[in-house]
Image (cartoon, rainbow, N blue to C red):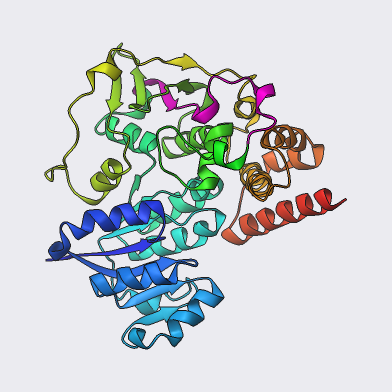
Amino acid sequence: MKKKIAILGSTGSIGKCLIDIIKKDKKNFEILLLSADVSDKELLKQAKFFKVKNLIITNEDSFNKLKKDKTCKNINIYNDFNNFRKIFRKKIDYTMSSIAGIQGLKPTIEIIKYTKKIAIANKEAIVCGWDLIEKNLNKYKTKFIPVDSEHFSIWYALQGIKKNLIEKIYLTASGGPFLDNSFKKLNKVNIKQVTNHPNWKMGKKISTDSATMINKVFEVIEAKKIFNIKYNKISILIHPKSYVHAIIRFKNGLTKIVVHDTSMEIPIFNSLYSSKKTIYSNNLDLKILNNLDFREVNLKRFPLVKIIKTLPDKSSLFETILVSINDKFVELFLNNKIKFTDISKKMNKMLKLYSLKKYKKIKPRNIDQIIKMNTKIKNDIEKFIQK
């Protein structure tokens, strides 16, 4: 019997990687839903190849283009995510949630009731709304697998092991394109230099986050929430080759190190298939293993990592504020309105404001509260910049 699946964000890098995996095994899958924001041509191409009957495209212009396309007459095309009940008559087997940004939170939470398993690649959804996600996972008995290479590696290493045996979790970070540069030398770097990641092919936003290492701050928050452990049990290690994805030290004196190729295909493949299915991967790279080159994080070079020490122990709206501030300042940088080094400087300055610290004690009650906070913070920054 074919596995019934849905892909939220099918035209992004994660979605495309999953599509390529399924193409090799097309006969065993039926895609019930694909979604995108603006990439109407790519979405339609995917839909025709897999004979998908339901599409969601959120950009108004892209939606109108598809609605006018005569080749789409046998496809149901929607403009928002309020139509899941029309699409899914019963629980499907698997959903990939890979919509980038805070806009991925609502569809991620709402599709949980319609799927037996959900793989989540959306950092912001987990950072801002994990309590809401977890509540629905438990309510609808939906299995969850993290897709970030680091969190997938931790999840894989912890299979059959009790969390109270964990002594320390180490997340690895490449250090991005400017690892060996001082912070002061980065004043004049341009967008092309910032987004030229040495190991991964990623979009401009996530590449910028890697260069400031705010992505690792988010990943520490994710690990804390997903695995229900305290911040003092999570550390970051610089590992320029991105070959080791997680190190877990246990209280019994043993340590697990998870290694895989620098490819998102491996965690995505393993989120889709059981352990009985095999995937091609390269032989162990002994040159890298003989020179892993682990380093501690230089906080002068990566000042945003200091934020971890200020995070509240319990889930709060402060995490949404952190995501929103970063999103806005990265957007300003990518639009050439501020310098690269301004991202870190302005973020750290803004996060110290007393008016924002109070949100460390306020737990998110629902999706709307998170989305409203995100909008408010971005509007406040826009007004501040204009002044």
The image quarter containing residue 72 is bottom left
Judging depth in this view, the residue of 133 and 374 nearest the camera is: 374
- What span is colored magenta in the figure? 165-189
Residue 184 lies within the magenta run: yes
Judging depth in this view, the residue of 2 and 290 nearest the camera is: 290
Answer with left or right where residue 249 lies relative to residue 109: left
**Relative to 309, residue 48 above or below:** below
**x and y percentages locating residue 26 in the rendered image:** 17, 63
Residue at position x 50%, y 32% from top?
A: 220
The image quarter containing residue 261 is top left
**Relative to 221, residue 146 above or below:** below
Answer with left or right where residue 121 lies relative to residue 24: right
Residue extending furthest toward the right = 387
Task: State how many labels appear.
Answer: 0
Which quadrant of the rendered structure holds the N terminus? bottom left
- Would residue 142 be visible to someone looking at this image? no
Residue at position x 53%, y 71% from top?
A: 59
Residue 66 lies within the magenta run: no
**Relative to 127, residue 43 above or below:** below
Judging depth in this view, the residue of 357 and 47 nearest the camera is: 47
Residue at position x 24%, y 70% from top?
A: 50
Judging depth in this view, the residue of 269 and 291 nearest the camera is: 291
**x and y percentages locating residue 30 in the rendered image:** 21, 68
- Would residue 146 be visible to someone looking at this image? yes
Answer with left or right where residue 9 lies relative to residue 190: left
**x and y percentages locating residue 375 in the rendered image:** 69, 57
**x and y percentages locating residue 270 in the rendered image:** 24, 44
